[in-house]
Image: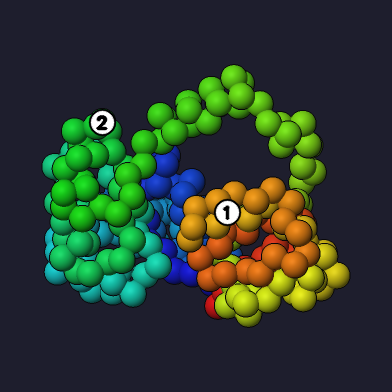
Amino acid sequence: MKRFTVIGLGNFGFYAAKALYEDGNEVIAVDMDKNRVQAVDAHCTEAILLEATDKEKLKALGLETMDGVILSTGTKISVSILICLHLHEMGVRQILAKALDDDHAKILKKVGATKIIHPERDVALRISQSLSRPNIMDFIPLSEGFDLVHIESPAEFIGKTLKEINLRAKFNVHIIAIKELVPENFILVPPPEFVIKGSDMLMMLGKSEDIKRIKALKG
């Protein structure tokens, strides 16, 4: 289980918190709007009514211990910039900030955001790519209850071959590709003798419940 905080519960923030929570993570959802906090209450670990621009109140949440903080505060650019700066000064490791435009994104980067999110642009890009450059996954209908995911290599897989970990027998999950980061390389249908490294990203296909069992190995 990982721990996340979502600040700003408009449409994007609400669904981000809900998705993270349903995937088995601890999620704290924060907003200054009472109605939004009440709406998300059933879809997170804890929903908090808070003015996030207040640095002292923000500090009290212990956000520096979180695996990531998603910042999604709507159309008030100055508010998101100030909160992002607070999070950076508090030592938050991963700050994923929603930007309204390129200039907003540049400023968020300057004040500490580790990843910039452009929701509309990102969705439009994925749809356009799926139309102009269809790949094999477009023709594989994944039934409900199955997932295709990228995960970091669990510690107990590192240094072992795919044959040794034998995921198909132990977890009923298939590794269909591996992205090596050092050196950068992409291997489709890796051979059984491939040795997993700590920097590898594994693309897995299997039942959602089996995928979650493997994610749990990461601790």
Q: Secondary structure at mark 1?
A: strand
Is residue 3 visible in the rendered image? The answer is yes
For residue 147, side relative to residue 20 (left or right) = right
Q: Residue at x 58, y 77 (%)?
A: 155
How much space separates mark 2 and mark 1, taking CA atoms? 30 Å
For residue 57, side relative to residue 28 (left or right) = left
Count how many numbered circles sit on residues in the image: 2
Q: Residue at x 42, y 54 (%)?
A: 38
* Amino acid type, mark 1: Lys
* Dot label at residue 179: 1
Q: Residue at x 16, y 49 (%)?
A: 110
* Dot label at residue 101: 2
Q: Is residue 210 above or below residue 134?
A: below
- Name the foreground residue: 180 vs 106: 180
The quadrant where residue 75 appears:
top left
- Name the foreground residue: 144 vs 179: 179
Quick one: quadrant of the N terminus? bottom right
- Residue 180 position, x and y percent, is 55, 57
For residue 25, side relative to residue 59 (left or right) = right
- Residue 87 position, x and y percent, is 22, 62
Q: Earlier in the sequence, mark 2 or mark 1?
A: 2
Discs 2/1, front: 1
Q: Residue at x 30, y 54 (%)?
A: 114
